[in-house]
Amino acid sequence: MADEAGQKAMLHFIEILMNSSAPLSISQLAGRFGSKNFTPEMRTAAGGNEEGLKSFLTKYPSLFNIEGRYGKAYTVYMLKFRK
C-alpha cells in the first residue's frame, strides 16, 4: 500500500510541475499536501514535510532535479526546464 501511495504522490508532483510555467520550490510543492486529492497516505509516503519531501523527490533523479543548499530554498525542476 505504501508503494502505491508513493507512486501516486510522485505522479501528483509531476503533474504540478508539468503544469507550471517555472520551477517550484520545495516549500511550494509541500504546500500541495493540503490538496483535496492528496491523501494522508500520499503525504506520509512523500515525507510529510519539506525536508521529507526533498528526500522523497531525490529518489527520482531522472524526473526531478533539486537545486539549492542548506539555509537556502530548494528549487525543483522537471527535465523540461533543464537547458
Image (spheres, rainbow, N blue to C red):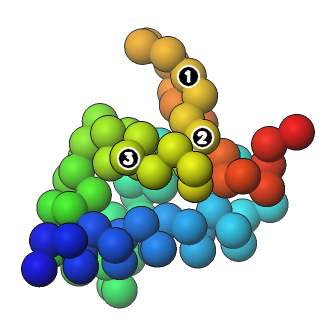
Contact between labelled residues 1 and 3, with CB atoms less than 8 Å apart: no
Contact between labelled residues 1 and 2, with CB atoms less than 8 Å apart: no
Vertical side of 2 occupied by 78: above or below: above
Question: Closer to the camera, 7 or 67?
Answer: 7
Label located before the other in sequence (2 or 3): 3
Disc 2 vs disc 3: which is toward the camera? 3
Disc 2 vs disc 1: which is toward the camera? 2
**Cα separation between marks 3 and 1:** 17 Å
The numbered mark at residue 59 is 3
Q: Residues within 10 Å of mark 3 (few under 14, many from 20)?
A: few
SS for callout 2:
strand
Q: Residues within 10 Å of mark 2 (few under 14, many from 20)?
A: some
Q: Residue at x 41, y 57 (%)?
A: 31
Q: Which residue is mark 2?
A: 65
Q: Residues within 10 Å of mark 1 (few under 14, many from 20)?
A: few
Q: Is residue 38 left or right of residue 75?
A: left
Q: Which residue is mark 1?
A: 68
Q: Residue at x 88, y 39 (%)?
A: 83
Q: Is residue 41 left or right of residue 37?
A: left
Q: Which residue reaches farthest bottom?
A: 37
Q: Give the amino acid at mark 3.
A: Lys
Q: Residue at x 25, y 42 (%)?
A: 52
